[in-house]
Amino acid sequence: MQGSPPTMTPPPAAASLADKRRFLGAPAAYPHAPARVDVLETHMSCVFLTGALAYKLKKPVRYPFLDFTSLAARRRFCMTELRLNRRLAGDVYRRVVPLRRDRHGRLKLGGGGGEIVDWLIEMEQLPAAEMLDNRIAANRVAAADVVGIARMLGRFYAAATPQVRGGGVYPRHLEKESAVNRALLLRQGWSTRTDRTVALLDRVEGLLERWTPVIHARIAAGRIVEGHGDLRPEHICLRQPIVAIDCLEFDREMRILDPYDEVNYLGLECERQGAGWIRPLLLATLEDALGGRPEPALLHTYGAFRAVLRARLCMAHLLDPEPQRPEHWPVAAQAYLALAEAECVRAGG
């Protein structure tokens, strides 16, 4: 009828994380039509495994050490993650792709029209059986594999720019993270709030203080570089060529470190999984590539710090509104604290 107001279609509601997770968890979301999609979740991301490819979606979360709450920030960190991971994983990291929504509220992955509501990293899906943690569990790791890992890492560190002027962030990071370790592990009501933990934290902090002058000397000697930042067995794939994935992308200061600290930590995690023979071989091969190996007591000090940090990260899962497997994390944290105590003994502290 003439003079009637036009019919207005209300805009679709904002796409929630649950909407995105539901869409991306369905095979129909992907152009290559996978038979199934498996979903993995962490504090900060959801990973969708489609067989040939994997897609990583950053959650809109904020922590003291990162802020993914804006769309612009998530795109920026996706681009940073793509660039950084290509250093050790090459074309495993393919591209950053948009997640779009049309005017009817329907989601679509990739190009075409529509509002961009998020960004994902598209990666080659690596074979799970070839990841180092799974190879250790299957007793399928040979000395040649470990030498290959260390040589690959040695080439990476040798090509990195020494952080002489900016290397001071490394000891400051160790000090800052030690304070956070103490605050969280001694949190009221947590199982780690014990006299034994207090004594352990005192020992680790004392060891770090003892070795701080040596760490500064290593900075001055050009031994500190920008590394991976989170080098664990589950991030190493023993295909050919060997690749390392999932570096820490959100804080460059956490990637400024001693290569021997990073590789020693990788070996410590292998030791925790029952393959204690891997650490000394990693370190010996790295020494062949880089020279400048620290004294054993400093390596064990690094190990004690990393084990305490991992204990704290385990317990931090309990801060989530709905923590997954809440019964698991205190047990895992205690195992790391025991590992840290053993490292302190080896360090003479």
Image (tube, rainbow, N blue to C red):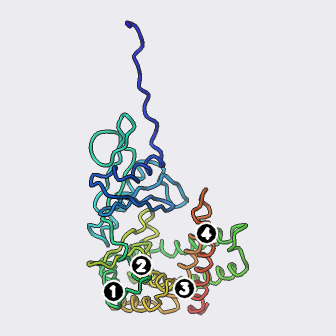
Name which of mark 3 and mark 1 comes first in the sequence: 1
Amino acid under disc 3: Thr
Q: Nearer the viewer, mark 2 or mark 4?
A: 2
Q: Secondary structure at mark 1?
A: helix
Report the Cα–Cα distance between label 3 and label 4: 22 Å
Amino acid under disc 4: Met
Q: Residues within 10 Å of mark 3 (few under 14, many from 20)?
A: many
Q: Which residue is mark 3?
A: 301
Name which of mark 2 and mark 4 comes first in the sequence: 2
Residue 48 in the image, given as x and y percentages of width and height: 39, 59
Name which of mark 3 and mark 4 comes first in the sequence: 3
Q: Residues within 10 Å of mark 1 (few under 14, many from 20)?
A: some
Q: Quadrant of residue 285?
A: bottom left
What number is the disc on residue 134?
A: 2
Q: Secondary structure at mark 2?
A: helix
Report the Cα–Cα distance between label 1 and label 2: 13 Å
Relative side of 34 to 274, left or right: left
Q: Secondary structure at mark 3?
A: helix
Q: Residues within 10 Å of mark 2 (few under 14, many from 20)?
A: some
Name which of mark 4 and mark 1 comes first in the sequence: 1
Residue nearer the viewer, 195 or 28: 28
Relative side of 143 to 349, left or right: left
Q: Which residue is depicted at the point 42% across and 89% down?
A: 278
Q: Residues within 10 Å of mark 4 (few under 14, many from 20)?
A: many
Q: Quadrant of residue 323?
A: bottom right
Contact check, label 4 and label 1, Cβ < 8 Å? no
Residue 133 in the image, given as x and y percentages of width and height: 43, 79
What number is the disc on residue 315?
A: 4
Amino acid under disc 2: Asn
Q: Nearer the viewer, mark 1 or mark 2?
A: 2
